[in-house]
């Protein structure tokens, strides 16, 4: 990479809830109709509805630096939270619904969302899982596929760092990322198969569409994939980030992983294929334990302490992080996670056995304070 690190962008999905009952609230269209009255958004930032009307998505513009990305994500959260409050809703940065089950049946969907409902039936009837997706620019489609091959071994560690969905409609699931459990029910989910070229990728996706497992080629459930819309690799592994800092951490680690993969490819080193079964075990262990237990090293097929694998990830991307100037920030953000815990751990602590308390705490934690986010250095 000759002109600095690749650009990046982040998509954040949020839940809308009734602030008094904790029930999810289907107010997305109302919030979208009024968000412009709650402050300007930076150029390039967009907001959209998601599969269910209980969800909203904020999309950053194309960013070069962590500071630029943090500014855009912070502005989007504040604007959406203000618009949600005006419609008697609270905006929650959590991967799954925390409060009790829905108070009423979900409204019927239209367009592509209706097609998704028809194909998957009860699987998506109450699917309100929210993720944090990171896009990192790559030179061309074939390179994107080769980069994705290099990412597979690190995706469970990124998931463990992001774990932020311990509850499911008022129930403590015992998992760090229940969202990932829900997502794993879809056909073709998990770590992408080892593919040799973009033509290989298209054939693999088209086969899933032809089998009726996907609605269209844009719908693959792989945890990292070549984007079908942008010249990027898209990371889809992380739960929605509890804070802007957690989202920035995912973005910087993801970008550094792409940079390291590009360097490996430039040196003629392709990634070895992973065992699909061991890779699935790695994803499950990360969803189950977050950073609070042992994860699976999917290369050696052995269990290791979570923070040992986080340390290995940091060493793997140390050179690109240093080159981009992001190493001190990533080290500081990782130390914050080590001290305060993942989003899932913090949610459980805030709940104290009562999810209504977690809902109130999440509503405050989602929106950055006026003076900034956790990171002030």
Image (cartoon, helix red, strand yellow):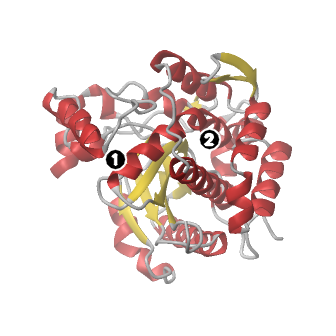
Image quarter in which the C terminus is found: bottom right
Tell which of 309 and 183 is nearer to you. Answer: 309
**Distance Cα–Cα, label 1 vs label 2:** 26 Å
Q: Residues within 10 Å of mark 2 (few under 14, many from 20)?
A: many
- Judging depth in this view, the residue of 248 and 24 nearest the camera is 248
Q: Say which residue label 1 marks.
A: 52
Q: Secondary structure at mark 1?
A: loop
> In the rendered image, which residue does mark 2 sit on?
158
Q: Position of residue 296 (x, y in %)?
A: 65, 22
Asked whether 151 or 228 is in front, the reply is 151
Give the percent coordinates (x, y) of residue 165.
Answer: 59, 37
In this rendering, position of residue 359 left or right of residue 220: right
Q: Residue at x 49, y 83 (%)?
A: 40
First along the sequence among labels 1 and 2: 1
Q: Pinpoint residue 375: horizontal percent, then vertical percent.
A: 78, 65
Q: Residue furthest front?
A: 268
Q: Residue at x 26, y 47 (%)?
A: 218
Relative to 10, say whether 199 is above or below. above
* Left or right: 234 as drawn, with respect to 118: right
In this rendering, is residue 325 above or below 157? below
Q: Position of residue 65 (x, y in %)?
A: 62, 72
Label 1 or label 2, whichever lies nearer to me, is: 2
Q: Indicate the quadrant where residue 370 lies.
A: bottom right
Q: Is residue 113 visible?
A: yes
Query: For mark 1, does the 10 Å Cα neighbourhood hold few (<14), some (14 to 19), or many (20 or more) residues?
Result: many
From what the image shows, is residue 229 above or below residue 100? below
Identify the residue at horizontal 72%, vertical 30% (top origin). 353
Q: Of helix, strand and loop, which one carries label 2? A: helix
On residue 181, the disc is none
Query: Which residue corresponds to the image point at 75% horizontal and 62% vertical from the top-left?
Result: 322
Looking at this view, is 283 or 257 the one in front? Answer: 257
In terms of image quadrants, where is residue 140? bottom left
């Amino acid at each position: 990479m000759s002109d600095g690190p690749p650009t990046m962008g982040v998509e954040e999905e949020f839940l809308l809830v009734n602030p008094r009952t904790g029930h999810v609230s289907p107010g997305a269209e109302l919030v979208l109709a009024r968000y412009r009255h709650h402050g300007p958004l930076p150029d390039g930032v967009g907001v959209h509805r998601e599969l269910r009307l209980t969800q909203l998505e904020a999309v950053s513009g194309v960013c070069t630096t962590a500071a630029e990305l943090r500014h855009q994500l912070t502005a989007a959260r504040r604007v959406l939270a203000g618009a949600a409050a005006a419609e008697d809703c609270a905006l929650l940065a959590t991967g799954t619904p925390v409060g009790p089950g829905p108070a009423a049946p979900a409204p019927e969907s239209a367009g592509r969302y209706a097609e998704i409902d028809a194909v998957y039936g009860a699987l998506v009837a109450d699917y309100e899982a929210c993720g944090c997706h990171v896009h990192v620019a790559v030179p061309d489609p074939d390179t994107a596929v080769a980069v994705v091959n290099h990412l597979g071994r690190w995706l469970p560690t990124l998931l463990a760092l992001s774990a932020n969905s311990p509850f499911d409609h008022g129930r403590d699931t015992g998992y760090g990322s229940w969202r990932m459990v829900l997502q794993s029910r879809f056909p073709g989910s998990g770590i992408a198969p080892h593919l040799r070229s973009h033509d290989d990728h298209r054939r693999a996706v088209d086969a899933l569409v032809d089998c009726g497992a996907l609605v269209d080629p844009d719908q693959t459930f792989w945890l990292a994939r070549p984007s079908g819309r942008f010249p990027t690799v898209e990371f889809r592994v992380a739960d929605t980030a509890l804070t802007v800092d957690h989202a920035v951490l995912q973005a910087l680690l993801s970008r550094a992983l792409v940079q390291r993969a590009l360097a490996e490819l430039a040196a003629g080193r392709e990634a070895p294929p992973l065992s699909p079964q061991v890779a699935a075990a790695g994803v499950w262990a990360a969803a189950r334990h977050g950073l609070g237990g042992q994860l699976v090293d999917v290369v050696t097929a052995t269990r290791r302490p979570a923070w040992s694998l986080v340390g290995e990830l940091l060493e793997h991307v140390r050179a690109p992080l240093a080159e981009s100037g992001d190493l001190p920030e990533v080290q500081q953000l990782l130390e914050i996670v080590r001290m305060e815990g993942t989003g899932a751990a913090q949610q459980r602590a805030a709940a104290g056995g009562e999810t209504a308390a977690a809902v109130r705490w999440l509503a405050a934690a989602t929106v950055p304070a006026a003076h900034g986010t956790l990171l002030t250095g």
